[in-house]
Image: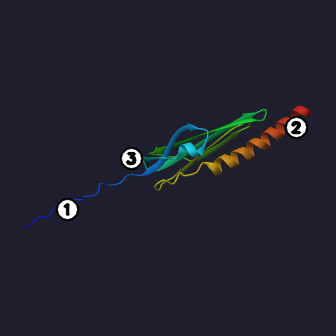
Amino acid sequence: MLKIKCFSFFPASSLQCYTCTSQSSNTNCMVPTNCSASDTSCMTSVVAGGIGGFTMSTITKTCEAICKESGLNAGIVSSKVSCCSTNLCNTSGASSIKSTYIILVVALGFLVTLLRQ
C-alpha cells in the first residue's frame, strides 16, 4: 500500500490587525501586526473626555482572542470598543471619535447651561 504525505509550502496565515497604544490620532494607529494563532478579532478602543472646552481622545488597537463590543457615556468621559474579524479591518477610529465628540459637545453644552443658571 502506497502512502502519500501532503505538505504545504504556505504557512497558515494568522489574522492581521492594526495596532497602537493610547494614541491621540488614528494616523498613528496604522501599524499592521500579525496576530497570534489564538487571536480571532481586531479591537479598537476609543476613550474621550473633556471639561471646560478641552477635549482629549485616545485610540488603542489590538489583536484579541475574545473581543466584546461596548460603549459607555459617563458625562464628561465616554468610551467605545468595536470588534471585527477580517484582516486589517480596524482601519479607522474616526467614526468612533466623531460620535464621541458629539456626545461630549452635548454634555458640555448641558453643563454650561447649568452653570449659567
Q: Where's residue 28, x and y in %? A: 55, 42
Say if mark 1 contacts mark 2, CB within 8 Å.
no
N-terminal-most mark, 3 or 1 = 1
Say if mark 3 contacts mark 1, CB within 8 Å.
no
Q: Which residue is situated farthest in the left direction here?
A: 1
Q: Residue at x 72, y 44 (%)?
A: 101
Tell me the crowding category of disc 3: few under 14, some 14 to 19, or many 20 or more residues within 10 angstroms, Cα based: few
Q: Quadrant of the C terminus?
A: top right
Q: Where's residue 68, x and y in %? A: 54, 46
**Residue 109 picture quarter:** top right
Tell me the crowding category of disc 2: few under 14, some 14 to 19, or many 20 or more residues within 10 angstroms, Cα based: few
**Residue 52 picture quarter:** top right
Local SS, label 2:
helix
Which residue position holds label 1?
A: 6
Which residue position holds label 3?
A: 38
Q: CA distance from mark 3 to mark 1?
A: 25 Å
Q: Where's residue 35, x and y in %? A: 41, 46
Q: Where's residue 41, x and y in %? A: 47, 50
Local SS, label 1:
loop
Q: Disc 3 or disc 1, which is closer to the eye?
A: 1
Horizontal side of 107 relative to 90 (left or right) equals right
Q: Nearer the viewer, residue 55 or 113?
A: 55
Q: Does 103 appear above or below 8? A: above
Q: Amino acid at mark 3?
A: Ser
Horizontal side of 42 relative to 116 (left or right) equals left
Q: Quadrant of the N terminus?
A: bottom left
Q: Which residue is situated farthest in the front direction here?
A: 27
Q: Does 117 appear above or below 41? A: above
Local SS, label 3:
loop
Q: CA distance from mark 2 to mark 3?
A: 50 Å
Which residue position holds label 2?
A: 113
